[in-house]
Amino acid sequence: MGGSVSCCFSPGESPKLHRRHVDLDECPITTTEDVSEDTGTYLQHISDRELPDELAQEANPSDHPRASTLFLNKSQTDVREKRKSNYMNHTSPGLLNKKYSSCSTIFIDDSTVSQPNLKSTIRCVALAIYYHIKNRDSNRSLDIFDEKKHPLSREKVPDDYSVVDPEHKLIYRFIRTLFSSAQLTAECAIVTLVYLERLLTYAEIDICPSNWKRIVLGAILLASKVWDDQAVWNVDYCQILKDITVEDMNEMERHFLELLQFNINVPASVYAKYYFDLRSLADDNNLSFPLEPLSNKRAQKLEAISRLCEDKYKDLSKSAMRRSMSAENMVGIKNSHAVLS
């Protein structure tokens, strides 16, 4: 049934090999009263062989909305150490440049779950990748993502390319260059992070100094094709990264999809979880989203966006009800509000 636990096993070789004639006297009939879990003939129920939901959610945070994201867990170690150091040394965490609302002025940022701020989102995604590399468990990798075997430029790869961890600024510049050149959206950056963590979970590899560029490039390439209506072609990325070939891009994309088991679905709940976890990461590392006072123009803009989304979701709910309506549900039907992203 696809689970990792099987009820049929052979302590030796395959049962199809070395078959011998067995008399019926050697195989006594066993009743249900004689069967116990201690004996090897106990047959598990299918519910006992399936993995519990808690284990599946813990193993696949990019598929389940209730599972904690990997990058937020890896960042908590540094956050706790930083807070402990500030407490022990009696040092201030820094200037409090965060703006607070008052009775006369309301400060809000222009980033929402449906329309995130591009610059702030890219900076947070780069920081999440930085923590992935810094706090990695090991250096498990695949040849297709190795920058030494598949270089992105003609420049010589340093000898210590697999040892020195990249800085947050270097990761941010790499992602920003791809997004600005390909004109990608902020939503694509969040989906990129979802695919990246899904790859690490499914393929059981680590993102490290030797493969981070190609893994990020593959995630961006796939996210842009899935999310954006007008996707960027592989040949367009060859114009951004001058020395990479189309054949290399195609091969990396094919391997990426196979490692993801062609699971490119990103539920709205998972997308929202990653968005709010990125905001939590920004707050923990003093990367606050830009706050601006709420003016009449911005208020009217937010109201227009809310009204547009509300009308859109009403149309979606009506179309869904028409598809699922039956004669038994014709009386007393009420529209239920749904929050989608």
Image (spheres, rainbow, N blue to C red):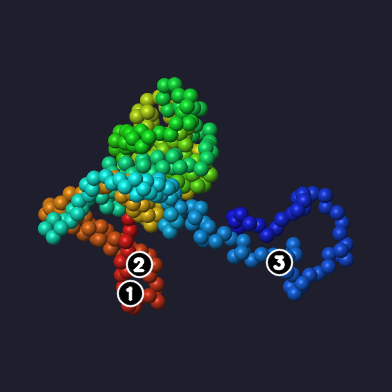
* CA distance for labels 3 and 1: 51 Å
Helix, strand or loop for disc 2: helix
Residue nearer the viewer, 328 or 248: 248
Q: Amino acid at mark 1?
A: Ile
Please report the residue visible at 61 percent of the width from the left and 64 percent of the height from the top: 48
- Image vertical order of residue 117 relative to residue 7, above or below: above
Q: Residue visible at 37% across and 28% down?
A: 241
Q: Is residue 149 left or right of residue 75?
A: right
Residue receiving disc 3: 37
For the residues marked 3 and 2, what is the alpha-carbon distance in whole angstroms? 49 Å
SS for tag 1?
Answer: loop
Q: Earlier in the sequence, mark 2 or mark 1?
A: 2
Residue 143 horizontal/vertical position (percent): 53, 33
Q: Residues within 10 Å of mark 3 (few under 14, many from 20)?
A: few
Q: CA distance from mark 2 to mark 1?
A: 9 Å
Residue for point 45% across, 31% down: 164
Q: Position of residue 224 (x, y in %)?
A: 36, 41
Q: Earlier in the sequence, mark 3 or mark 2?
A: 3
Q: Earlier in the sequence, mark 3 or mark 1?
A: 3
Q: Residue at x 77, y 49 (%)?
A: 13
Which residue is the site of mark 1?
333
Of residue 29 and residue 64, the one placed in the foreground of this image is 64
- Residue 321's mark? 2
The type of residue carrying mark 2 is Met
Q: Which mark is residue 289?
A: none
Q: Nearer the viewer, mark 3 or mark 2?
A: 3
